[in-house]
Amino acid sequence: MSEKLVIRNIGLILTGKIEAPIQDGDCVVAVDGKITAVGYEKDLDTSGAATIVDAHGVTIAPGLIDSHIHPVVGDYTPRQQQLHWIDSTLNGGVTTLISAGEVHMPGRPKDIVGLKAMAIAAQRWYENFRPSGVKVHAGAPVIEQGMEEQDFKDMADAGVTLIGEVGLGTVKDGPTAKKMIDWARKYGMQSTIHTGGPSIPGSGLIDADIVLEAGTDVIGHINGGHSALPDDQIVCLCESCQAGLEIVHNGNERAALLTLNTARELDQLDRVILGTDGPAGSGVQPLGILRMIAMLSSLGNVPAEIAMCFGNGNTARQRELDTGLMEAGYCADFVLMDQAQHAPGKTILESIQLGNLPGVGMTVIDGVIRSHRSRNTPPAGKLPEVLG
């Protein structure tokens, strides 16, 4: 028996597609956790639904994606001695998290056997257990001196698909990083690199030359995590490669706007993706992705529907995910939200572009409702309702 979800009476459909961020329609249909149709209810087959949601005119968007987190185990982080941080993040509209390395594991093994074992274990425990239903792509080993090609093959064969931030371990030079990243890419593993000054003991300065030589898929926290590179190096990175330009909450806001403006001048806003870089010394940011969307929209003068794509569709395409886009065949991962009560602006989009957060009223992952009215965002003007 297939499980069918119908979300009707939608006020605005955001797609995550930067080339077409808004879609006409008032209804989304999903079967067995996958989107099957997006459009007007009168044109769609909505019969036989196991769950019907009346959106009451609120906005729906693909669930947000945090491109840069540092998880450890389950829904606990020893970095800030905090429980349920992932559930709290779900309440900020985020349905998918991507690890940039499990660096805060107490006693993190740095020998090659140990780091491979931990990467495989981390990939497994988040594959087997989703905190509050959130998808956590983890098992992102921090590469160390002495690793060989076989080590990357071993990890890939065991299901590891990510490489943690290059530069957090003993590999801090361009030639060694490039050699290992090429091995990782050969076996289908995506990579990111630390950018800017040191963030934790053991990390170091990673400047533009090293970033460009390493050739990772994503330029991790291009706006610094915490300390950003000089302006000319940030501009150089934007101009000199095609890697993802990852802007994070736990970075330098001025450098974030410089990155945004440079990407816009290059007509490459599709490269901009968002992360929080938490848990970290700055703590956990349950509303970090929404805050970055509002900040970049308001201070960067970007239409809110475009800025929203930085937090879902751009990342989905950069990371080759099956979520983050409002399109048939993609996972039915959604955030339903509305303009916050008494927030300025005539519409939710105008309100966001004025720098205000929307109110989250519901999240859905794989076609299953995971949360209702957010305990973290400001209260929404209107709330969706489950009819059956």
Image (cartoon, rainbow, N blue to C red):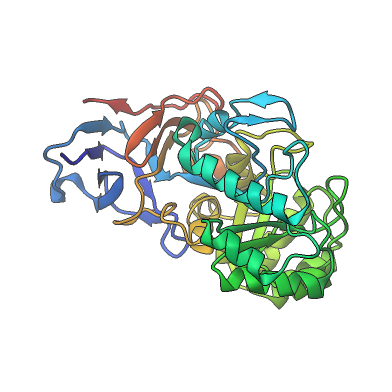
Residue 145 at what x, y percent from top left? 81, 63
Residue 269 at what x, y percent from top left? 58, 65
Quarter holding the C terminus is top left
Query: Taking 134 as reference, is 70 left or right?
Result: right
Residue 91 at what x, y percent from top left? 51, 30
The image quarter in which residue 144 lies: bottom right
The image quarter in which residue 270 lies: bottom right
Whether residue 32 is visible:
yes
Query: Taking 334 as reference, is 218 left or right?
Result: right
Query: Taking 175 as reference, is 68 left or right?
Result: left
- Nearer-the-camera pick, 341 or 54: 54
Query: Taking 161 as reference, is 110 left or right?
Result: right
Residue 212 lies, with reference to residue 60, above or below; the image says below
Residue, far front: 113
Quarter holding the N terminus is top left
**Number of numbered markers:** 0
- Nearer-the-camera pick, 259 or 224: 224
- Nearer-the-camera pick, 2 or 30: 2
Residue 373 lies, with reference to residue 112, above or below; the image says above
Name which residue lies at 50% across and 37% down.
93
Residue 139 at what x, y percent from top left? 60, 49
Name which residue lies at 59% across and 66% down.
153
Whether residue 243 is visible:
no
